[in-house]
């Protein structure tokens, strides 16, 4: 009997629906090739719904979404909605409520894609950033007093518990072992300034590594130096584990080295619950509805989803198809410059799967 996966789809705002459509097309192709079934159910969360109803996310949404095997997200962010409302109310809310404590972001340069890094090819850029996804300045701890006066005080706290750090590190060590490339895990922090938070991270890193992962080599880099090495010697990296805020920043840097937002995908993972996969690029309002946005990142997040669900061969087939397309068809990944429309790009990948 063939397996069936129930997938919740949140196309979201801007170009989200366009790229999700292509991701679904490719997932359907993979499902029929590898003999499993996918039921998609769409949810209309996003800016349009908020503008119409005044509700950002129904209270029932997290519980509803927990019933699915996985979630596929397009993009969140609307030009007519003040920044922060949708991002915090939908994207961050779901990450928190569903306790998706890992944000997995592969940085991989596909063949044929030109990187802004001089003299670096696919053999140099192939690592994974594991970003902690529930703590840090993202928890909303802090506040403001004397707002609007010259004495205004604004505080946003960097918060980490030992439990949050431990579970993230444990995942990172396991992931590095399972990846089995260079068996090296780098902690990216700032132990020279953030002497409470990153002291906690560093102690936990060494304790967990020594006790359970003697086969995994440990390295440490400050976040500023990490940025430098990601540009100068990306081939040094195998897996990087880091905090939420640093992970947010360094993964945009990583994304541009792999060819930009058109190709960068990520997974918000709850290893014990429901995970959510998304292209990390955003809603790109200026390209909305023009059929010019690059769907490869969304397609790639679909592949990550299948891998997470245990459909490794299907996931690999999609990744191979993407690589074939970048190597032989699409040279420029920028919206409108691909030489193929959004839907044609989806077709190219689907045919190859
Ligand atoms: C990301 C984004 C989000 C984040 C924003 C949209 C809230 O930048 O997924 O990297 O900061 O996590
Ligand atoms: Mg970001």
Image (cartoon, rainbow, N blue to C red):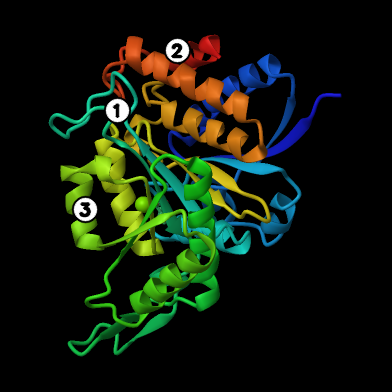
Residue identified by numbered label 1: 122
Residue 227's mark?
3
Name the front one of labels 3 and 2: 3
Name the front one of labels 3 and 1: 1
**Which of pointers 3 and 1 lies earlier in the amino acid sequence?**
1
What is the distance, in whole Å, between disc 1 and disc 2 at their CAs?
A: 25 Å
Residue 19 drawn at (x, y percent) = 48, 29
Q: Quadrant of residue 218?
A: bottom left
**Which of pointers 1 and 2 lies earlier in the amino acid sequence?**
1
Direction from residue 30 to residue 157 in the image, left or right: left
Q: Quadrant of residue 287?
A: top left
For residue 278, say whether it is visible: yes
Report if the CB atoms under discs 3 and 1 are less than 8 Å apart: no
Question: In which quadrant is the N terminus drawn?
Answer: top right
Q: Quadrant of residue 147?
A: bottom left
What is the distance, in whole Å, between disc 3 and disc 1 at their CAs?
A: 19 Å
């Amino acid at each position: 009997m063939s397996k069936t996966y129930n997938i919740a789809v949140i196309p979201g705002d801007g170009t989200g629906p366009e790229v999700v459509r292509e991701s679904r097309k490719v997932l359907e192709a993979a499902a029929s090739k590898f003999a499993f079934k996918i039921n998609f159910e769409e949810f209309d969360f996003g800016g349009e719904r908020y503008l119409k109803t005044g509700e950002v996310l129904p209270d029932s949404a997290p519980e509803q979404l927990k019933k699915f095997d996985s979630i596929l997200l397009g993009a969140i962010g609307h030009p007519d909605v003040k920044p922060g409302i949708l991002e915090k109310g939908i994207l961050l809310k779901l990450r928190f409520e569903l306790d998706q404590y890992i944000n997995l972001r592969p940085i991989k340069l596909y063949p044929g894609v030109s990187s802004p890094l001089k003299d670096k090819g696919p053999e140099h850029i192939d690592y994974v950033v594991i970003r902690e996804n529930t703590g840090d300045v993202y928890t909303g701890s802090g506040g403001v007093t004397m707002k609007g006066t010259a004495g205004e005080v604004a505080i946003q706290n960097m918060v980490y518990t030992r439990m949050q750090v431990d579970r993230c590190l444990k995942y990172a060590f396991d992931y590095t072992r399972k990846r089995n490339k260079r068996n090296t895990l780098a902690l990216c922090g700032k132990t020279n300034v953030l002497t409470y938070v990153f002291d906690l991270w560093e102690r936990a890193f060494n304790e967990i590594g020594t006790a359970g992962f003697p086969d995994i080599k440990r390295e440490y880099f400050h976040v500023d130096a990490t940025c430098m090495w990601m540009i100068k010697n990306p081939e040094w990296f195998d897996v990087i584990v880091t905090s939420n805020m640093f992970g947010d920043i360094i993964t945009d840097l990583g994304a541009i080295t792999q060819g930009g937002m058109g190709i960068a995908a990520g997974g918000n993972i709850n290893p014990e619950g429901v995970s959510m996969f998304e292209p990390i690029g955003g809603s790109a309002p200026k390209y909305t509805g023009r059929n010019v946005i690059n769907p490869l990142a969304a397609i790639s997040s679909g592949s990550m989803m299948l891998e997470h669900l245990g459909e490794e061969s299907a996931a690999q087939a999609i990744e191979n198809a993407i690589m074939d397309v970048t190597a032989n068809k699409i040279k420029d990944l920028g919206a409108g410059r691909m030489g193929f429309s959004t839907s044609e790009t989806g077709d190219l990948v689907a045919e190859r799967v």
